[in-house]
Amino acid sequence: MIKMLVLATVCLAISMPALACRGTSQFPEAAAVLAAADMSAETKKDLQERLSDAEALHARGHEIGNGVMMGKALMVLDEIKAEVRK
């Protein structure tokens, strides 16, 4: 019983950063907004590629526990969201 409780606690502790991270919800939201955005096809394609690369970087950062990597990905996300709002 105690082993199961310890295992559950460890699993929860490992998953909490991903659950609490804004990127886990904001990357898909940004992709949807970008897909519907009224902008040139070239600009949209460029932003979609940057967003995809940043999302992959963000996911990799979570996999290896690299906060700097996740932070860089979130900065790109914020830049893209600002560009779409223009």
Image (spheres, rainbow, N blue to C red):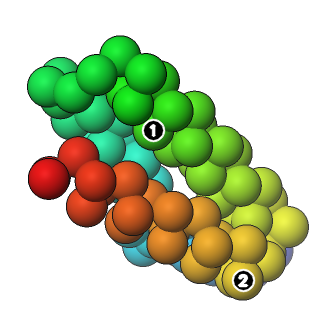
Residue 49 x, y percent position in the rendering: 57, 33
Q: Are marks 2 and 1 in contact (CB under 8 Å)?
A: no
- Residue 17 is situated, as x and y percent measured from the top left of the image, at 56, 75
Q: Amino acid at mark 2?
A: Val
Which residue in the rendered view is the most extreme toward the right? Answer: 64
Identify which residue, 78 or 26, lies in the foreground: 78
| Residue 8 visible in rendering | no
Q: Nearer the viewer, mark 2 or mark 1?
A: 1
Tag 2 residue: 68
Q: Which residue is mark 1?
A: 47
Q: CA distance from mark 2 to mark 1?
A: 22 Å
* Residue in the foreground of this view, choosing between 16 and 43: 43
Mark 2 crowdedness (10 Å alpha carbons): few <14, some 14-19, many ≥20 = few
Quarter of the rendering containing residue 65: bottom right
Residue placed at 72% from the left, 83% from the top? 68
Of 3 and 69, the residue lying toward us: 69
Which structural element holds mark 2?
A: helix
Q: Mark 1 belongs to which amino acid?
A: Leu
- 63 left or right, relative to 44: right
